[in-house]
Amino acid sequence: MRMGRIAALSIGIATLTAGAVVPAVAHSSEGAAQIRQTQSDSGDRARGALWLYQNSHYKGGKKKITSKDANFRNNYFSNGKSLNDRVSSVKNRSSKAWRLYKDAGYHGPSTKILPNHQLFNLRSTNVGNDAASSVK
Ligand SMILES: [Ca+2]
């Protein structure tokens, strides 16, 4: 398990590094098409992976999200705890923006997480700490 997490983190870091190059070369339509092709071959980035953490500063249980989810009630962190109303920090390891919602079904106050951005504590955001219930 531990090796798996380290490998996943390494992929995430490599993805972030690749992401930093994209804006500089996306100035022509030809270049942009090439970039999209590359993205589809680059793991987390292509799937738009979002990492959710149980505690602030990316600690506690974690969960990789690769597609939208209307209800966290049947999702669990790596330590077996339910995701619902427990998310405290988040890392967006992808090229797409994600939005966390306080309520299930993408309702209630929400917080946008920009591509390749992270929030060490959701306390001061619209969705709030230990409150998120859906994401897309
Ligand atoms: Ca929490």
Image (spheres, rainbow, N blue to C red):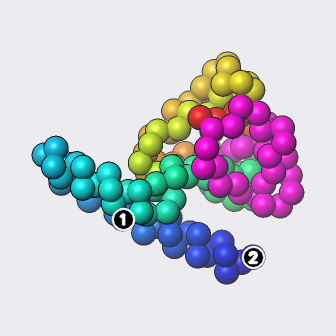
Task: Mark yes or no: residue 91 visible.
Answer: no
| Badge 1 element | helix
State left or right for residue 98 relative to residue 79: left
Residue extending farthest left: 28
| Direction top: furthest residue | 108
In-front residue for pair 27/89: 27
Q: Position of residue 6 (x, y in %)?
A: 61, 75
132 in relation to 91, above or below: above
Q: Residue at x 32, y 51 (%)?
A: 36
- What kind of residue is marked 1? Thr
Q: Is residue 136 left or right of residue 46?
A: right
Q: Secondary structure at mark 2?
A: loop
The residues tagged by marks 1 and 2 sit, at their Cα atoms, a distance apart of 25 Å
Which residue position is annotated with label 1?
A: 17
* 14 drawn magenta: no
Say which quadrant the C terminus sits in.
top right
The main secondary structure of the magenta stretch is loop
Question: Of the residues shown, which amino acid type is indicated by label 2?
Answer: Met
Q: Which residue is mark 2?
A: 1
Mark 1 or mark 2: name the one nearer the start of the chain: 2
**Rendered location of residue 33, percent (x, y):** 24, 49
Q: Are marks 1 and 2 in contact (CB under 8 Å)?
A: no
Instruction: Say whether residue 88 is magenta.
Output: yes
Q: Is residue 92 above or below residue 114?
A: below
> Which segment is the magenta one?
61-90
Other residues around mark 2 within 10 Å, as few (<14) / some (14–19) / many (≥20): few
